[in-house]
Image (tube, rainbow, N blue to C red):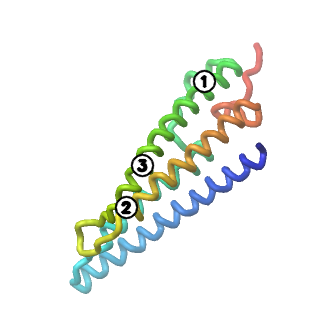
Amino acid sequence: MSTFVRLIHGLSRLCGVVAVALIALSIVIVCQMVFVRALLGQSVIWQTEFVTFSLIAATFIGAPYVLLTRGHVNVELLPLYLGHRARVALALVGSAAALLFCLAVLWNSVSWWWEAYSKNWTTDSMWRLHLWIPYLSVPVGMAVLSLQYVADIYCVATGRDMPFGLPPKERT
């Protein structure tokens, strides 16, 4: 299982790199869009859609990396007052609930993506981007996020990782 955890952590890091690349590319495209529109007086056709889809994709694809680095919003008030066993139980219940939510989103997003792919949906703009391409970021992000939750649950359950990143509470 150690290999599985390392593989998922590596995959989550790769997702983080992809998300950063999408954001950086979006910044470049926005600058290009401003230059073309303001200085050259030309219309922008694909830039707005590209940036919108890229930022949404960065959000979904980057989510596993955020979970890996414990970057999600987390209120630690209750875990601070709980003992180690209760922290572990709370972390496992919370992660299991989040995993179920991610699996539900994954299930629905796969059918949504497949519908866009099989029916050859495109955007309404002149660019006519095939929508299955940007829609793919949702099931990919949710699949890796679900795997990251499985790895986190395993690490907390086996004592390889401390729940909420807090050390075991010392007895007083």
**Above-or-below relation of 100 to 28:** above
Percent position of residue 65, x then y: 58, 51
**Above-or-below relation of 142 to 28:** above
Picture disc at residue 102: none
Residue at 76 percent of width and 36 percent of height = 160
Quadrant in the rendering for residue 13:
bottom right
Write down the residue under mark 1: 90
Q: Amino acid at mark 2?
A: Ser
- State which mark lies toward you, 1 or 2: 2
Residue at 41 percent of width and 44 percent of height = 108
Residue in the foreground of this view, choosing between 102 and 19: 102
Percent position of residue 139, x then y: 48, 52
Mark 1 Cα-neighbour bin, 10 Å: few <14, some 14–19, many ≥20: some
**Above-or-below relation of 76 to 120:** above
Quadrant in the rendering for residue 99:
top right
Q: Amino acid at mark 3?
A: Ser
Q: Give the distance between the C-alpha atoms of the residues marked 1 and 2, in whole angstroms.
A: 42 Å
| Callout 1: SS | helix
Residue in the foreground of this view, choosing between 77 and 101: 101
Please tell me which of labels 2 and 3 falls first in the chain.
Answer: 3
Q: Give the distance between the C-alpha atoms of the residues marked 2 and 3, in whole angstroms.
A: 14 Å
Q: Are marks 2 and 3 in contact (CB under 8 Å)?
A: no
Residue at 31 percent of width and 66 percent of height = 49
Residue at 26 percent of width and 84 percent of height = 39
Percent position of residue 53, x then y: 37, 62
